[in-house]
Amino acid sequence: MSTAFQSPSSSPLALGRFGQKRYTIRRKFFKLFGGAFHIYDEAGTLAFYSKMKAFKLKEDLRVYSDEDMREELITIKARGIIDLGMTYDVVDAVTGKPLGALRRKGLRSILRDQWLVLDVNDQEVGKIEEDSMALALVRRFLTNLIPQSFSGALGTNQVLAFHQRFNPFIQKIDLDFSMDERGLLDRRLGIAAAVLLCAIEGRQQ
């Protein structure tokens, strides 16, 4: 497995805002332009604020330390014009260092959402997938009131879980990294994946 995705407990990234095992994401539904997400840590403190830039042909999301948006932490940019199989590059905005990429499986995601996790060399190292085909089909063709759930793995090791709470008015998501006891997934890439799931998959709800 690529060492680019390892985030050891001794790393500074394992502390502070990136060192939480669980987060809660709240999406603003009534924002006129673009999209905005608040990400809270286990204590209920705002850990990240994410905003999608409006009126961009290439989707562009930024993750900041707070709503003031003075400190940009993560940049997520689409490589091309929006399509079903888009690849999104994830970059540490502080250092400018590439962290990897996330690629949506185009045709397959029409029925059941699936994302590939890529390392800095565009090699597939993991996958993030919607919970079940049956529930995915019910959401698409019968009702979108069934909350979405995703699980993410690097190789055979589960590293994240993404669960949408049932609420017809406010989108709230539980993001759980607690099963990643060895710190295989770089939390920056994990946070970026959660923001993309909220922004891209959220449009289907």
Image (spheres, rainbow, N blue to C red):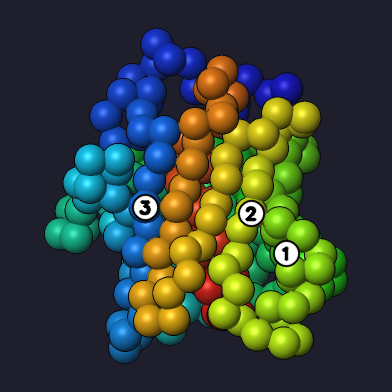
Check whether the beta carbons of the residues at disc 1 and disc 2 lie within 8 A of each other: yes
Q: Which residue was labeled with disc 2? A: 150
The amino acid type, in three-letter code, at marker 3 is Thr
The amino acid type, in three-letter code, at marker 2 is Phe
| Residue 203 % position (x, y) | 55, 79
Residue 159, above or below 85? above
Residue 93, above or below 68? above
Q: Residues within 10 Å of mark 2 (few under 14, many from 20)?
A: many
Q: What element does badge 1 sit on?
A: loop
| Residue 200 % position (x, y) | 57, 70
Q: Nearer the viewer, mark 3 or mark 1?
A: 3
Residue drawn at the location 73% of the way across and 22% of the way down? 1
Q: Nearer the viewer, mark 1 or mark 2?
A: 2
**CA distance separating discs 1 and 2:** 9 Å
| Residue 53 % position (x, y) | 38, 73
Which quadrant is the C terminus positioned in?
bottom right
Q: What element does badge 2 sit on?
A: strand
The amino acid type, in three-letter code, at marker 1 is Asp
Residue drawn at the location 35% of the way across and 64% of the way down? 26
Left or right: residue 154 versus residue 33 is: right
How many numbered discs? 3
Foreground residue among 84 and 158? 158
**Lower position in the chain sequence, tag 1 or tag 2:** 1
Residue drawn at the location 74% of the way across and 70% of the way down? 136
Q: Residues within 10 Å of mark 1 (few under 14, many from 20)?
A: many
Q: Mark on residue 24?
A: 3
Q: Which residue was labeled with disc 1? A: 113
**Lower position in the chain sequence, tag 3 or tag 2:** 3
Residue 30 visible in the snapshot: yes
